[in-house]
Amino acid sequence: MEEPSTSPLPAAFLDFLKENDLDPSIYAATDSTPRYVRLKPGYEADVEEIEAEIKCKLEKVNWLPGFYSLPPDVQIAGSQAYKTGKIYGIDAASGAAVTALDVSPGNHVLDLCAAPGAKLCMIVDLLDGLGSVTGVDVSQHRLAACRTMLQKYALGDICRLFVADGATFSLIPVNVTSESRSEDSVDRLKEWTSRKSWKERKKAAIAKQNAAAELVQRCQEPELIFYGLKSGVVGFTKSEIYRSPSESELLSYGYDRVLVDAECTHDGSIKHIQKFESWGWTSLQRRVLDAERTDNLTVLQLRLLTNGFRLLKSGGILVYSTCSLTVAQNEDVVEQFLKDNASAELQEIEAARNWPCKSGRIPKTLRFDPWASQTSGLFVAKFLKLAE
């Protein structure tokens, strides 16, 4: 079992917590905060078998469908259930952020800060094979982890992944903007899949993915590192995939749902903060407490939120979240964003009525924390894009 923290929190961090009206005792909640897994849909009958393998009962999370909790010391990485993709680790608070998106089959969804990929996998599950998911992250090696997860859980069919800066990314779902071409592509794809064996299709798809990746690497555009057969890439030209939409076109053909789980100081993650005991508390000053870094992060967070909202169609939903508990990275960003975007309306999260969370400092926003929620810390805000 993981040992509880014995090192006192440094004075600078305690001052940081006081400035943000945060209780230092939340960082002693490691032993009482469970870990969470999501059961892949279709494997409900395998719960008892999974419990026998990991020698632990999976406790159903009543407020979040498909989620189970288990003691924090239980390891699942070596289990067959994990290796074969029946379960995957994702904090319940992160699952709540995805749930707040109200994803429906057929939606085209953008995950603007997709790595490491657990929320991306949940989004794909909710789409049930209909629609598409575009995952974006500025870090190539972290996005490669997303690709690995999609392949491991056999969820990549409707996904495409781009290495790109989420604050400037400007591609929309191709199969929305070229409906007639998309229908032709689907017809050709059906004909192609009916003629070729599975091995032939896989070989051809891999060859096409490799060729596309090599082509994209020679350009300065977002780097396409993965796409599924139904992701809106197969059957389209490079110019169609990379065409920049006009602002008016975005209102009609943008994404139905956008998730912006923005880069932050991660101070809401107890386990992340406790890592500084081994990393050294001086690195905490640089990574979390440094005013210049925090200022740079809040600028980035606002840019990510603004660009994600720009790529949203009229009537679409965007969820902004961070695993920081600070006001500067949450409510202050939301407040500035609302001032700058008249077509953005903060929404009540209907599903949250039974969630173990608190209201944020702005009405309709939510905060999860280890003591109140038995989850990692997370801030969540939901926006509707009004017609202009």
Image (cartoon, rainbow, N blue to C red):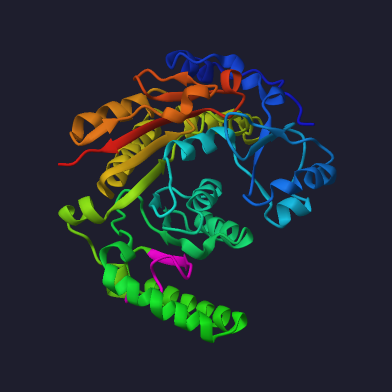
Q: In which quarter of the image is residue 356?
A: top right
- Residue 325 in sight: no
Task: Please provide the residue range marked out in magenta.
Answer: 223-237
Q: Quadrant of residue 152?
A: bottom right
The foreground one among 74 and 140 is: 74
Rendered location of residue 280, percent (x, y) = 61, 32
**Membership of 226 in magenta stretch:** yes
Rendered location of residue 311, percent (x, y) = 28, 50
Q: In which quarter of the image is residue 160?
A: bottom left
* Residue drawn at 61 percent across, 40 percent down: 66
Q: Is residue 28 left or right of residue 182?
A: right
Q: In this view, does 36 lie to the left or right of 202?
A: right
* Residue drawn at 50 percent across, 53 percent down: 124
Rendered location of residue 161, percent (x, y) = 45, 60
User: As displayed, is residue 180 above or below residue 199?
Assistant: above
**Membership of 11 in magenta stretch:** no
- Residue 37 in sight: yes
Question: From the image, which quarter does the N terminus lie in?
Answer: top right
Q: Main secondary structure of the magenta part?
A: loop
Rendered location of residue 144, percent (x, y) = 53, 60
* Residue drawn at 46 percent across, 66 percent down: 225
